[in-house]
Amino acid sequence: MDISILECQKVTVRFGGVVALNRVNFSVPAKSITSIIGPNGAGKTTLINAITGFVSCSEGSICFNGQDISKQPSHERGRAGVVRTFQNLEIFSNMTVLENVMTGRHRLVNYSFFDCLFKTPRYRAEEKKCRQKAGELLEFVGLPDRWDVPAGELPFGSQRLLELARALAGDPHLLLLDEPAAGLNIRETRQLAQLIQRIRDQLGITVALVEHDMDLVMSISDQVTVLSFGQVIATGTPLEVQKNPEVIAAYLGGEKEA
Amino acid sequence: MNGFKRDLLTISLFLAGMLLLPRCLTNEYYVNVLIISGLNAIVAVGLNLLLGFAGQISLGHAAFYGLAAYTTSILTTTYNLPIIAGILAGIVLVGLVAYLIGIPTLKLSGHYLAMATLGFGIIVYIVFNETIELTGGPSGFVGIPRLSLFGYSFDSDLSYYYLVVFVLAIVLMFSLNLIRSRIGRALRAIHTSEKAAQISGIDIARYKLFIFVLSAILAGIAGVLYAHYLEFIAPSSFGFNHSVLLVTMVVLGGMTNVWGAVAGAFFLTMLPEFLRAFENIEFLLYGFILIVCMMFLPEGIVGGIQKLVRKLT
């Protein structure tokens, strides 16, 4: 638990004159469930964007498995095993449910352009393997049927699960979830909590999530990091963070020493 | 596997239909129209891979078509090179040019490819017109040898028609195979969400470049076949209007389906021939039909047929 899979040091992100993240130190212990919380506009999503390469940081380093990935483009981070979901779903609505998950496995499907032009045995074998794995993952997240339906036709809650299955399909080492419970009802949120734990326990994938639902965060997290105005104000176990006066102040909007 | 068998069946049916078609024609001139339709279909299928699947617009495909046609014409006529060498040179050159245009433009997101290809098309058109010693200028390039390959000369229109249908069938087969693979999935992913595609490990700039070059090469293949069929080419066939017509073929036929481009190409190439009887109001009718099609078939001809079939079954 002590070895960090991800280590962000002094990460600073600026949008023009606005400092969205200010020298943020953030680490994710391997095989943990780590949550990032904080008031609106604290920079939580920006942190995920910085880790996955959608915004570039002006200072600081992001080390993944001991390698600095802060200069790599997103797709290379994806191939290295840093995968995420999005707050506003980014489903491939023009593809079927199964194809969405198969696309998530892109980097692990191994055949060339000529293999697919001529449908060689290698193409068939690899596609079959990919389809099988995609099916397994859809069952794992709780979407056992309707695989041939265009993904855009699924209800919202199922699309969230589909996006999770697609993210898992690339066999990631670190899965980042950006508000996975947004728009879900209480029952769906409870199922999501179990699913996140199963992802860690059964698949051995480290999970980091940004979330507003405090019940969810406090019940599943091993470690919680609190951001406020682009700075880390607390890191610790859920219990420690809940007692921290600075955190309480940030959430209630009081003075720092209040 | 199921999809593959269905593709094989539709292609066989298509091939059989196309091979029987000339026997039903009353006028030999129509074979000529079918050949041009088939060539346009080859370009449109390539353009559809770019436009319909990867979501990138090219407004310069007629220039690729023309560049290949002029290259093989000049090499085989002025320099007396063998036809096979001219053809290969034309296709390779088009691929290379597309690659050079694609590298800087496809790294940017947005409509830069449309702008770059628009400019490229206009430049190529000017070059065809102005380099009179090389291309013959606006009055065209004459005396191109008729295609002959491996000792067989495609002298009759009918034999040329069979060749074009054969090439089109292969292009279709490969395109369908491509779409149902990791490459096809990557292209469609880029079309809907570049962010999610990147996270899946897809190098979007590389895939856009790849499909742009591939679709230019398909335009090149059609271009060399065009030159060695008509034995005469002129810049007016490769201008901006033709590029727009090609895009219209893809959109009208239906962008979500490989067959859409084929339907669009045949429809729009043959339509003016049918409208010729109306003389004065020919263009009026042409525009009217286009508007009606887009109003009632927003998903294109093939999309509309699919919807109808689903309703009936």
Image (cartoon, coloured by chain):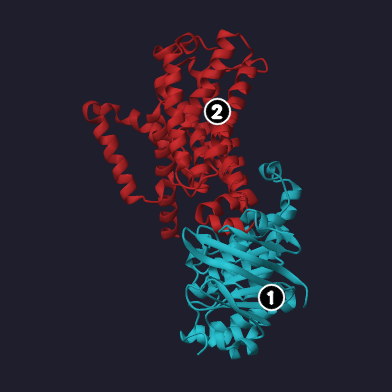
Chain colours: A cyan, B red
Q: Is residue B195 above or below residue B41?
A: below
Q: Is residue B79 above or below residue B254?
A: above
Q: CA distance from mark 1 to mark 2?
A: 50 Å
| Left or right, B64 with reference to B184 | left
Q: Amino acid at mark 1?
A: Ile
Residue B122 coordinates in the image, percent (x, y): 42, 27
Label annotation for residue A131: none
**Label 1 element class:** helix
| The N terminus of chain B, quarter of image | bottom right
> Where is residue B295 shown, x and y percent of the image?
31, 49
Quarter of the rendering occupied by the C terminus of chain B: bottom left
Tell me what residue is drawn at x 73 percent, y 51 percent: A110
In the image, farthest residue toward the left: B280
Label 2 sits on a secondary structure element that is helix
Among the 4 quarters of the image, the one containing residue A108? bottom right
Q: Is residue B58 visible?
A: yes
Q: Residue at x 49, y 24 (%)?
A: B66
Q: Nearer the viewer, residue B136 or A73?
A: A73
The x and y percentages for residue B145 are 55, 12
Instruction: From the top left corner, tell me how far across and down residue A228 is, in percent.
Output: 53, 76
Label 1 marks a residue whose chain is A
Q: Examine the rendered structure and indicate whether residue B235 appears above or below residue A112.
A: above
Can you identify the residue that label 1 sits on? Answer: A199
Viewer-nearest residue: A174 or B274: A174
- Which residue is located at x 52 percent, y 80 percent? A212
Q: Specify the amino acid type for callout 2.
A: Gly
Please report the residue visible at 51 percent of the width from the left and 83 percent of the height from the top.
A250
> Badge 2 is on which residue?
B220
